[in-house]
Amino acid sequence: MPPKKHCQCTIIPGGPAVVTERMPAMRTASLGIWIPAGSRHEAAAQEGMAHFWEHMAFKGTEARPAHRIALELDLLGGLADAYTSREHTCFTIRVAADHLAQAWDILADIALSPCLPPEEMAREKDVILQEIGMVEDTPDDKLLESLWEAAWDDRAVGHPITGPARGVADFEPAGLWAWRAANYRPGAMVVAAAGAVDHEALADMVAGVFSGLPPVPAASPETAPVAAFRPGSLALPRDVEQAHVAMGFPVPGNVDDGRFARAALCTILGGNMSSRLFQEVREKRGLAYAVSSDLNTLSDMGLLEIHAAVDPGRVEELLDVVRAQLAAMASGGVTRQELAHVREHLRGLMHLGAESTENRMVRLAKNHLLFGRHVPLSETAARIARLSLDEIGQAAADILNPARAVAGILGPQANASWLAGAAS
C-alpha cells in the first residue's frame, strides 16, 4: 500500500475544497472553515455585517444554544476562535486528534447554521460597540485604521471591519440574512486542517455536512476593482501623552510575485531590532520606544506602513530621520550584508511557523484561496534564497516615495502641517 501523501485536496461537489496536511509527529490538529466573505464585500448599508455574523456564530445555532456551544468546546479541551478580515471570515479550532470529529461537528454547526436570537443579537451589538470604542481609545489602532481608510477611494475597501457604531446598532435580521445568503456560498469555501489528520475521513465528514444543506447556486466569478490610492495627510487631535505618527505607501497585493522582495524591504526598513528605523530612531537617538514597518495587504493591493510614537515636541526630528532613511533606501537600495541577513530572517520565521499546526492550516487555506494550490515550504524557501539586491532595490525605488504616501498624526494639538514633506 503506497504511503499517504502529506498534503491532499478534495473538492466536494457543490461544497468546499478540503485541503489537509498530515504532520505525523503531532498529536493535535488545527481545523478551519474559511469563507471568502469579509468587509470588502459589504455595501454602505451593510458595513460591519461580516464581522457581526462572526460574533453571532457562538451565540446559538438551530441545534445548540450558546451555553451548550461553550460547554462542548470546553469538554474537548480545544481552543476555538474566529476572525473577520477584509476578504474572508474564518472559524478555527485546535484539538487533540481523537476529538477531531466532534470538533468538526461543532465548527460546522456554528459556521453554517447560526441563529439570530433577539436577546443575543441585542447583547452582541453592545459587545461590538464596546469593541469599536476600544479602537477609539487605542491611539495606534485608531491612527492606522484611519490611515487605511484615507488611503483608498473605494469605501468598501477602506471602511473599518467592525462597521460604524450607528450602522451596527441599526442592524435588522432581514438585512443580515440577505447579506449572508449572497456571500456564504459553499462552493467558494475552504475547509483546511493540519496535524494528526486523516484526509479521507475529514473529506467524508465535510461531504456529509454539506450534502445536508440546501443547494446554493454558484456565484458568477467577479473581480473586485482595484481601489485607487489617494496620497495626502490627516490629523487626529487627541489628549494623549505621545504623538503617534504613521505613513502608508501603496503596494501590490499578495498574489504578486514581488511580495517576497517587499517582505524583505519591509523587514530591513523597520521589521526587526536590527532594522534601519529601529537602529536610527530608538537605539541611536532614543526618539521612540517603538518604531516599526509592516505590510498590510489584501490579495490585490495594500500598504507598507510605518508607525512610531514620540514626544510631541520631537515629531519633526522623528520625521527628518524617517525621511532620510526612506531616501537612502530608495536611492541606494540595501547592502549585501542586509540581503544575507534578511534571507536568513525570513527563512527562520518560515520554519518557526511550520512547527505549528495552526500556522500550517492557515497557510494551506490562504494559498488555496489565493493560488488554488498547495505551495510547499521548499518552494517558498527557494524563492527567499533567490532574493537579490536588484529586486529589493527596485522595490525600494518604486515604493518609498513620500510624494505617493498617505501620512497621519494623532496626538495633542495634532496638525497636518507637521507632516509637510512626509506626504507631499
Image: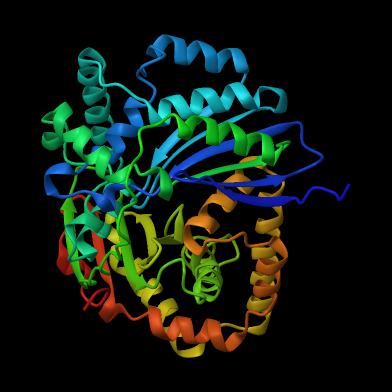
Q: Is residue 171 above or below residue 150?
A: above
Q: Is residue 286 visible?
A: no
Give x and y (percent) for residue 366.
51, 54
Quarter where residue 317 is shown: bottom left
Outermost residue, right direction?
1
Residue under the point 72% across and 46% down: 355
Q: Is residue 354 visible?
A: yes
Q: Is residue 225 left or right of residue 70?
A: left
Between residue 409 and residue 188, name the one nearer to us.
188
Between residue 206 and residue 422, name the one nearer to us.
206
Quarter where residue 304 is shown: bottom left
Residue under the point 36% across and 38% down: 215
Q: Is residue 212 above or below residue 363?
A: above
Can you say which quadrant of the picture contains the C terminus? Answer: bottom left
Give the image's coloring scheme: rainbow
How many numbered discs sit on the rendered protein? 0
Residue under the point 22% across and 13% down: 119
Between residue 330 and residue 361, name the one nearer to us.
361
Q: Is residue 18 left or right of residue 53?
A: right
Residue under the point 49% across and 28% down: 107
Q: Is residue 377 left or right of residue 139?
A: right
Give x and y (percent) for residue 109.
44, 25
Give x and y (percent) for residue 326.
41, 78
Between residue 202 and residue 375, name the one nearer to us.
202
